[in-house]
Image (cartoon, grey):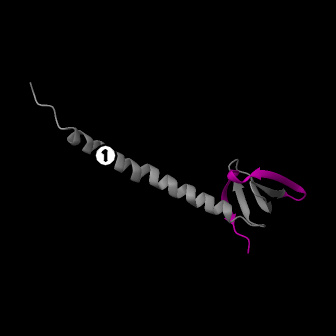
Amino acid sequence: MQPQPNFLVQLVPMAIIFGIFYFLVISPEKKKQKEHKNLLDNLKKNDEVVTAAGIHGTVVNVKDKTVVLRLDENVRVEFEKEAILVVSKKAE
């Protein structure tokens, strides 16, 4: 019979794999989520934005959970804030 390896010896490779996974996947995703939340918190009137659907518009009104965008003259649409992906041009 061969002696079984120590439990701690088996645990070390798993911890290393988890550490690599954390720094390559979890940490950058958390940073990206924090930047997106900051972007949404700083939305202002006249910011030009792009939604998740690819719709380009100008912010007319910012509410708690929604944003009203002007898409064209006399065309206004209300979107969830989470649908805003990119602020292409900040208001002056």
Horizontal arrangement in the rendering, residue 30 relative to residue 1 (left or right): right
**Percent coordinates x, y for residue 47 in the rendering:** 74, 66
Query: x, y percentage for residue 91?
Result: 73, 71
Q: Quadrant of residue 70?
A: bottom right
Identified by mark 1, the residue type is: Ala
Question: In the shown orientation, is residue 51 left or right of residue 23?
Answer: right
Magenta-colored stretch includes residue 79: yes
The rendered magenta stretch, by its main secondary structure, is classed as: strand
Nearer to us in this view, 52 or 38: 38
Residue 46 covered by magenta stretch: no
Q: Which residues are magenta?
A: 72-92
Q: Residue furthest left?
A: 1
**Residue at the (77%, 51%) spot, across then down:** 79
Q: Residue furthest top?
A: 1
Residue labelled with disc 1: 15
Left or right relative to 27: residue 16: left
Residue in view at x 71 percent, y 64 percent: 43
The quarter of the picture where the N terminus appears is: top left
Residue projecting furthest to the right:
74
Viewed as shown, does residue 50 lie left or right of 31?
right
Residue, x 20% and y 42% (percent of image)?
9
Q: 69 or 62, which is in the foreground?
A: 62
